[in-house]
Structure formats: structure tokens, C-alpha cells
Image (spheres, rainbow, N blue to C red):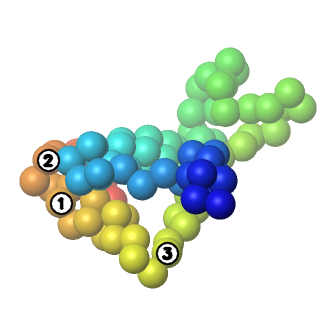
Amino acid sequence: TNRKQQQQRRRRGNIQLVAGSGKTYVAWKVMEGLLLTPREEEAEDTNSDNDNNNNKDDNGTDYWPRIGVFVTPFLNLVDQALSNREAHRILMNPNRKIP
């Protein structure tokens, strides 16, 4: 049964990485990409200027990413990433204020 449990653990998608493997940096870059994506009200200005907009689906409908955060009782990654972002100059776009 021990071997069977090890095989099942290997198949899981949420493998825990060791400290220092770059989890926080990856979280910063993902959040940066999502947070710096234009919102609908900003898109109206760019849509009128640019007919070849990459933010349209096949029907011509605008789509915008939504941010979802899955938090477990022992996951401090999001809090850790947001608290240290200024020190590493992540999410520091001077043209846009991000809380």
C-alpha cells in the first residue's frame, strides 16, 4: 500500500515545492500580468483607436481575464508575495495605481 500511495502522490497536480524554488516570484509575475491587463472601461478607449484588438473572441465580443485566488489554511503565498512586491519592484507601474 505504501508504493500505491507514492504513485498516487506523484500524479497530483499540486506538488509542494521546497523553499527557495521561486514560488513567490512566479506568483508575482502571474499577478502582475493579470493586474496590469486593461479593464473594460480602459478598453473602450483603445478599441476605438485599434480595430485589430487582441482582446476579442471569434464573435467580436470583448473578454477580460478574471482573477481568482485559491487559498488553503496554510497557504501564505499571496500575502507573502504582495507584502514584498515593493522591495523587488514588482507591480510598480508608474502609470497605474495598484493597491
Disc assigned to residue 72: 3
- Do the residues under discs 3 and 2 have CB atoms within 8 angstroms? no
What x and y, as percent, mark residue 62?
Answer: 74, 40
Secondary element type, mark 1: loop
What x and y, as percent, mark residue 47?
Answer: 64, 32
Foreground residue among 30 and 46: 30
What x and y, as percent, mark residue 19?
Answer: 23, 53
Q: Label 2 is placed on what type of residue?
A: His
Q: Label 3 is placed on what type of residue?
A: Thr
Disc assigned to residue 88: 2
- Do the residues under discs 3 and 1 have CB atoms within 8 angstroms? no
Q: Is residue 29 left or right of residue 41?
A: left
Q: Which residue is most to the bottom?
A: 73
The residue under the point 59% across, 26% down is 49
- Closer to the chain start, of discs 3 and 1, is 3
Task: Look at the image and tell me in which quarter the N terminus lies.
Answer: bottom right
Disc assigned to residue 84: 1
Decide if residue 41 is in sight here: no
Foreground residue among 20 and 41: 20
The residue under the point 27% across, 43% down is 21
Task: Look at the image and tell me in which quarter the C terminus lies.
Answer: bottom left
What x and y, as percent, mark residue 12?
Answer: 61, 51
Disc assigned to residue 50: none
Q: Which residue is most to the top?
A: 52
Q: Residues within 10 Å of mark 3 (few under 14, many from 20)?
A: few
Q: Label 1 is placed on what type of residue?
A: Asn
- Closer to the chain start, of discs 3 and 2, is 3
Q: Is residue 18 left or right of residue 9?
A: left
The residue under the point 66% across, 25% down is 53
Q: Which residue is most to the right?
A: 59
Secondary element type, mark 2: loop
